[in-house]
Each structure stands twice: as structure tokens, then as C-alpha cells.
Amino acid sequence: DNEIMKWKFHTIGLFCLFIIRITSGQCPDDCRCPRPGQVDCSGSDILEIPTSIPPNIRSLIMLNTEVKELPDRILENMTALLILRIEKSELSILGSKALSNLISLRYLSLLNNRLQEIPDGLFKDLTKLETLILANNQISELHPLVFSTLMIGLSKLNLDIPNGLLNQLTSLQEIALHSNQISQVPADIFAYNTYLQKIFISNNKLSSLPQGFLMNLPELSKLTLHANAIKEITTGVFGPLPKLKELWLYDNQLEKLGANVFLNLTYTQLLIISRNQIQYISIDAFNGLDELLELSLHTNALSTLEEDVFHSLPKLQSISIHSNKINHLPIDLFRDMFNLATIQLAK
């Protein structure tokens, strides 16, 4: 019996060793396979997509390569692939069918390449894609239907947004378009994205906000518009936004805040309008901000404040107004603001 057991363990050991050798033997030349199902073909020695990559892998990573083209159908046998990263390379050409049959793909990053265009139909088979990163390329425009099959978060696209770009992404919950060169947004850009919870459009070149572009977003909780060139906010641009908690507007070129500009932000708790050029605030500018807890107005051009300018902020806890041109404040400026705990008058 002992001899039989030893023979069985010996056989099992040989079998396992055989399997390990087979698995490691499938790793393409010049690539690493650190874990089962993962292939890493990184480095300047990689000039093209290796053709010997096993079809059943889950993750393919290619960083700092000299790969210039992703040809049609080059990956079509990788139906189990979940993660594809081709980053910091020379990639400039994408075949319209380069991603065909990647039916399981969840994460796609083409970060830091030389792409100038995205061909129509490229994402057609990526019905399960959750994250798409096209950051730091040279993309100048996109066809409105290029994302029609996807539910994604866009990051760092260098483009102006065409009409209808997001119409098909009805389940979209977060979109990041920050750090681009976007100079305008269509009024109906988010008309079909009623599930959006976070919008990041900071660090762009927006000079104005179109009426109605935030009208149908009942789930939106965070909106960043800082570091643009916005000169004016007109009444009705924001809202109704019943769940918006944070609004970031610092580092723009605002010169005044008119009456009722935030009227529909009834649940907003954080409003950052510092580092603008604001000289005038209407006595009714903050109407509607019933739940506001923190207000930042520092580093503007204010020389005075109306006595009742904060009368509609009953829950305000913190306010910063330092680095303005204010010489004196009305004695009753903070009257009946019983929750106010912090007033920053100086740096």
C-alpha cells in the first residue's frame, strides 16, 4: 500500500510539473507571465503585438513599447480577456476591427500614446466595458456614435464635445472630461444621462455654461467646473439638482454673482467660488442654498458685502472671505447664523 501511495504522489507531482511547464512554455518571447492568465509584454524591444499570446488570458499589459499599430482582429481569439493596457507607447493607428470579439473586456487603457482618431465601430463588441481611458493622446474629434455600445467614464480627451456623443450611454454614472482643451459643451450633452452622479469638467477652456445643460440630472452629487475661463453664471444654469452636494467653481473669471443663480441647489453643502474676479454679489445670490455648510469666497475682488447677503444660509458652518479688498464688514453681516463656527478673514 505504501508503495502504491508513493507511486500515486509521484505521478501527481509529475503531472503538476508537466502542467506548470506547459503554462510557462506558453509565455511569448520577450514577455513575462507573472501569474496565471496574465501576460506583460512591456519594454522598447516590443515592436508589434506578439502573435504567440495564449488566447485564454485575462490580462494583457504593454507599457513603454515601440508598437505603432493595432491591426484588425489581432486580439479576436482572446474572448476571456478582462484587462487590456497599451500605455506610454508609440501607438498611432487603430484598425476599425482591432478590438473585435473582446466580448469579456471590462477595462481598456490606451493612455499616453499618439492616437489622433478613433475609428467608427472600434468599440462595437465591447458590450461589457466599464472603464475606458484615452488620456494624453492627440485626439481632436470623435464621431457622436463612437461610444454607442458602451457604459464608460471618459478621462482626458483632447476635444470639443460633438452633439449626441453621450446619447447612447443611458446607464452612465460618472464622466471625467477634466484636463483637456474643451471650450464649449452642447446644451443637451447630458440629456440622456439621468443616472449621472459625478461630472468632472475642470481644467478646460469653458468660458460660458449653456442654459439647460444640467436640467435632467436628478442623481448628480458632485460637479467640478474649476480652472476654466467661465465669466458669468446665469440664472437657471444649475438645476434642478436635488442631490448635488458639491459644486467647485474656483479659478474661473467670474466678476459677479447675480440673484438666484444657485436657486435650485437646495441640498448643496459645499460651494467653492474662490480665486475668481468677483466684485459684486447680489443680496439674493445665495437663495435656495438651504443646506449649505461651507462657502469659499476668498481671493476675489470684493470691496464690500451687503448686510443681508448671507441671510438665506441658515446652516452655514464655515466661510472664507480673506484676500479680497474689503476694508470693513457690516456689523450684522452674520446675524442669526447660529451654526457658523469658522470665519476666515485672513490667511
Image (cartoon, rainbow, N blue to C red):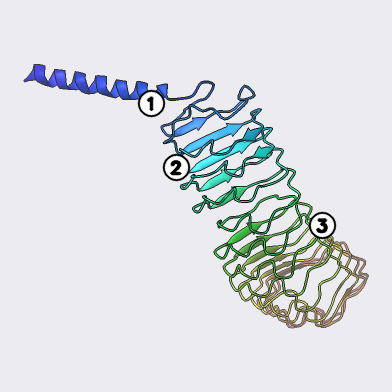
Residue 114: image quadrant is top right
Mark 3 nearby-residue class (10 Å; few <14, some 14–19, many ≥20) = some
Left or right of 198, for residue 282: right
The residue type indicated by label 3 comes to: Lys
326 sits left or right of 180 in the view = right
Q: Decide if residue 342 is in sight here.
A: no
Q: Which residue is drawn at 79% across and 52% down?
A: 181
The CA span between labels 2 and 3 is 40 Å
Front-lying residue, 109 or 164: 164
Q: Which of 25 and 334 is in front in this view?
A: 25
Q: Identity of the amino acid at label 2?
A: Thr
Please tell me which of labels 2 and 3 falls first in the chain.
2
How far from the left and from the top, in percent, is residue 190? 66, 67
Element marked by disc 2: loop
Q: Residue 152, image x and y in percent?
A: 58, 55
Residue at numbered disc 1:
23
Mark 1 is surrounded, within 10 Å at the Cα level, by few (under 14), some (14 to 19) or many (20 or more) other residues, namely some
Residue type at mark 1: give it.
Answer: Thr
> What is the spatial separation of the Cα atoms under label 1 and label 2, in whole angstroms?
18 Å
Q: Is mark 1 on a helix, strand or loop?
A: helix
Q: Mark 3 points at which residue?
A: 205
The reply to whether residue 332 is visible in this rendering is yes
Disc number for residue 79:
2
